[in-house]
Amino acid sequence: MNLGRALLYFLREASISLVRSWKASAVAVLTIAMSLLVGGFFVLATSNISRRVAEWSTQLRVAAYLTKDSEAAERAELERLMAGPDWVLRVETVSAAEALERFSASFPSLRDVLADTGVEAFAPSLEAVLAPQAAASRDLEGWLSEVRAHSSVAWVDDDREWLARLSAILRLVRSAGLAIGAGLLAAATLTIASVVRLTAYLYVEEIAVMRMVGATEFFIRGPFYVEGCLQGLLGAVFGYAGLQTVAWMMLRNDQSLWLPLIFEGLVTWRSAALLAGVGAAAGLLGAVLSLRRESLRVEGRE
Amino acid sequence: MIEFYSVTKRYPGGQAALDGVSFRLAAGEFVFLTGSSGAGKTTLLRLIYREELPSDGQILVNGRNVAELPLRKVPYLRRSIGVVFQDFRLIPRKTVFENVSYLPRILGASPRRQREVAFDALRQVGLAHRLSAFPRQLSGGEQQRVAVARALVNQPEILLADEPTGNLDPDLGLEILKLLVTIQRRGTTVFLATHDRQTIEHFGGRLLVLDRGRLIEDRRVEGREGPPEAVPGGAVGIAQGVAASRGVVASRGVVASRGTAG
C-alpha cells in the first residue's frame, strides 16, 4: 500500500481511538506533559545558566573593595597596580552610589531593605576586567596577592571563586533535574504503553477480523503506533504551554536579572521542536513496548 | 485446491480435535462439512486459513503447505480465502461500505477502486443500497450478507462458511445458502460447515461428515433443488480424491510432516 495513504489511514484510526478512549488518553497526555514540563524546565534553566557561566568565565572581573579611609593617592597607586598586566583590559571605578544602583537592579525585591541604610551599606571599588587568557596566566595569583595586600583594599572579590561554586551547584541541579525528568518520562512512556494496550484490548475482536481478512502486522499495529505518537505530541504541546505559563507567572511581577536569564530562549522553534520530538519518541516507544509481545493475538492463537 | 493429508489437531491436554483427516477439494466445488457439535468442523476450517496449525499431517491450499508458510506470508494466504462466520464478525463502528472495503483499502486500492469493488460485492448480495448503514442497523440476514460481500470483495478462490445460517431464521438461512450456491456457480470453491441436515438435504451435493475428529463419510447426496454443480475441472469424488491425494503425497515424497502446533 502507498505509504502516504497508509499513514493517513493510521492517523484517522488513531484519532478516532483517542476520542473513543479519551479518559485514558487524557491521563497519558497529562503524564507526559508533566514530565516534559519538569524535565524541560530543568534542562532549559540549567542550560541557560551554564551558557552564561561559560560566557562569564571568559569575562572575569576582579573587584577590589576600598577601605573607607583610603586616600586618593593610594587609590591611584592601586589602579596602576591593577592595570599593570597586559591581560587586564581596563580598570573601572565603581562608587558606592553606583554599587547601590547595581544591587537594586539585580535584586529589586530587596530595595525596601536598603531604604534605611542607603549608600552607606556599599563600599566603593576598583574593578579590573580581565582578558580570557588571564585565567591561564601564571602571574594571576601573584597579581591577586599584591592587590589583596594593598593598604587601601578592604577585600577582593574574585569571580572565579563564585563561578566555580555556581558551576558545581549547576551540575548538581542539572543532574537532579535530568533524573527527575527521566523518571517522569519513563513513567509517562509506561502510562502510554498501558493506554495503548488497553485500547488494543478494546479492539481485540476487530483486530481478529483484520487478521482474518489478510491485514499485515504493519497495517494492524500502525494505528496504535501513531496513537502513541499523538499522545506524546499532545503531551509535548501541553508541557510547552505549561512551561510558558510558568515563565509568564514568574516573570509577571519580577524585575530581577535572574528569571529572564533562566527562561531565556523558551519561545523558540528549537525548544518547541525538541519537546515535541521527545514527546513523540516517548509515545512511540510506549506503543512499541505495549505491542511487543504479540499482545494483539487473540487467545494466544498462532 | 484444498488438500488434507492425515491431518491431526490436538490441543494441549485434550483429545484430538481432528484425527488423521484426509480429503481433497477441487476448484469450483461446493462441499458441505457436517457433524455434531464438537466434531471438529470449525477446527478444520481454521486450519485451512492458518488460524490453527496442524499437530500432524499436511494441508495444501493451492499447492502451498500452509503449516510451513512464514508468519509474514499468512496474510497473503488469507486474502485468497473468504471466510463467513455464524456470528458475522462485522466491525460495529464501521459502516457497511467500510467493512466491505477494508481489504481493498489495505491492499492499496484507490478510494475510487475501493468504492467500485465494495459496491460490486454488495450488489451481488443485494445490499448496494445500505452502503452507509452500520451493522447494528441491519437485520441478521443483512449482516450475514454483508459478511458474504466482505468475503467476496477480493474475488477469493475459496469461500469458507462456518455455520453461516446458525443465527438466522430458516427463510433467511435459505436465502444465504442460495447466495453461496450462486457464488459457487461463478467458479468459487465453497466449503460450508453446518450441522443442519435439512439444509444439506435441500440442496444436496458433496458431503463430508466428521465424528469426534474423524472423517467418517465423504459422499454425494441428492437434494430437492438438485446439487450445486461443480464448475469444469471441479468436483472429485472421495475415492478419486483421497487416492489422488495419497498419490500426490507419495510422488512428492512428502509424508505427513509435523506442523508446529499453536
Image: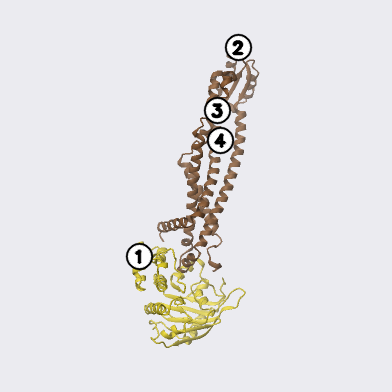
Chain colours: A brown, B yellow
* Amino acid carrying mark 4 in the image: Ser
The residue that mark 1 highlights is B115
* Amino acid carrying mark 3 in the image: Phe
Q: Secondary structure at mark 2?
A: loop
Q: Share a chain, discs 4 and 2? A: yes
Q: CA distance from mark 4 to mark 3?
A: 21 Å
* Rendered image quadrant of residue A172: top right
Marks 1, 3: nearer the viewer:
3
* Amino acid carrying mark 1 in the image: Arg
The residue that mark 2 highlights is A71
Q: Secondary structure at mark 3?
A: loop
Quadrant where the image shows the C terminus of chain A: bottom right
The subunit letter for the residue under badge 4 reads: A
Q: CA distance from mark 4 to mark 2?
A: 40 Å
Marks 2, 1: nearer the viewer:
1
The crowd level at tag 2 (other Cα within 10 Å; few <14, some 14-19, many 20+) is few
Q: CA distance from mark 2 to mark 1?
A: 98 Å
Disc assigned to residue A50: 4
Q: CA distance from mark 1 to mark 3?
A: 71 Å
Instruction: Give coordinates of residue B48: x percent, y percent.
Output: 49, 75
